[in-house]
Image: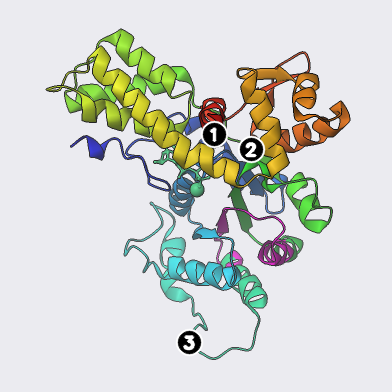
Amino acid sequence: MHEEIFSPSFGNRPSSLVGRERLLNQIETGLQSRPGSRERAVVLLGQRGSGKTVLLWELADRMRQQGFAVASPTIVSEGMLERILEKIEDDCDGSSDGKPHLAGGSVGALGFSAGIQFERDTPTTKSPQQRLVQLCRQLTAKGRGILILVDELQASSPEIRQLIGTYQEMVGERLNVAIVMAGLPGAVSTTLNDKVLTFLNRSRKITLDPLEYGEVDAFFKRSFDTLGIAIASDLRRKASEYTAGSPYLLQLVGHYTCLYAEDGTVTEASLAEALQTSSEDFKSDVCATTLAALSDRDIDFLTALASQGDEASTAVIAELMGATTDYAQKYRRRLLDGGVIKPAGRGKVAFAVPFLGEHLRWEER
Ligand SMILES: Nc1ncnc2c1ncn2[C@@H]1O[C@H](COP(=O)(O)OP(=O)(O)OP(=O)(O)O)[C@@H](O)[C@H]1O
Ligand SMILES: [Mg+2]
């Protein structure tokens, strides 16, 4: 039963989207600004489990309501452009969910999807780039926009280079197109020094912050009430704090708190067990995956940090790494760029991913 409210798994649309309303409204407004404006190209950056994929799907829904033809989130991989093309064509057909996509638009706009002829069945020698531009021209002429959504951004991939080139071509023609790409904070790394990086730097970069405590707590209160789970307010506040504002951790904590409740009542013991299990899942799903993407030296840096508690100065870390401060600075920079650590004042850094320090100390044993 509680699975209807809490479902901790990646890419899963949550029953209720916590704390992203303002951000979504801002992005939505930006995507509808003048074609070619900076607000129309958005890069969403966030750690694992911060809710990037979910936001992309939410934007897809919202922008369809605004009459846009949307290419639902496509993961960067070979043949990406073809897939984007197909998704937009499907969206225009209205065949993807059988519903008309315009909520109360003008008659002309509503009658539109039936009125456009695609050449998808006729053999074509045109490249996917050319076909995408052509489709966008047709749609722009009909007063409709195109929104392209890309997930798991790999800025150095040839597919992204190609897509960005095509986007710029469309913008050059003043076509009604917008793009949102989501990736890990390190995805836009300074090691890229070409057109792609310039483009990404000029687009609107948004970092997904942790959810606000108040929003998490209000959501827990609402959800436990709905589910008929009894929980004392101090225990509920403890659960809310434990999430550290991570959407994925919020799903885990909610799920296990309900699962371990005794006859519908959360006790101190059942909550402790729920939090313990949540952190274990989080460590293996988020911490371990985050570390797997790093180099051995990055991990040496993090292990040194972990040995000092959850905060340390670069000088101390360098000493523990047996390296010069300059050398350690390089790794500090990389890890900051990657959103794995954050500045903690007075030359110190701290972990930016919940439980990462604990996870490393546990691994060291
Ligand atoms: N605003 C939110 N409110 C409630 N739950 C959320 C919210 N955002 C995400 N979630 C939940 O958190 C989990 C992770 O979300 P999601 O898969 O979108 O993260 P992600 O940033 O795409 O992670 P990854 O980098 O691993 O792909 C899912 O279970 C999702 O339902
Ligand atoms: Mg994702």
- The answer to whether 177 appears left or right of 53 in the picture is right
Q: Is there any visible trace of residue 50 in the rendered image? A: no
What amino acid does circle 3 point to? Asp
- Label 1, on which residue? 23
- Secondary structure at badge 2 equals strand
Ligand 1 picture quarter: top left
Residue 94 image position (x, y, % from top left): 39, 66
Label pair 3/1, CB-CB below 8 angstroms = no
In the displayed image of the protein, which residue is found farthest to the front? 365
- Label 2, on which residue? 206
- Residue at 62% x, 24% y is 306
| Mark 3: few/some/many CA within 10 Å (<14, 14-19, 20+) | few
Considering depth in this image, is 255 or 14 the residue closer to the camera?
A: 255
- Label 3, on which residue? 121
C-alpha distance separating marks 2 and 3:
39 Å
- Residue at 48% x, 75% y is 116
Considering depth in this image, is 179 or 162 the residue closer to the camera?
A: 162
C-alpha distance separating marks 1 and 2:
9 Å
| Pointer 3 or 1: first along the chain | 1
Using the rendered view, name the quadrant where residue 278 is placed. Answer: top left
What amino acid does circle 1 point to? Leu
| Pointer 1 or 2: first along the chain | 1
Q: Which residues are magenta?
A: 140-167
What amino acid does circle 2 point to? Ile
- Secondary structure at badge 3 equals loop
Residue 295 image position (x, y, % from top left): 69, 45
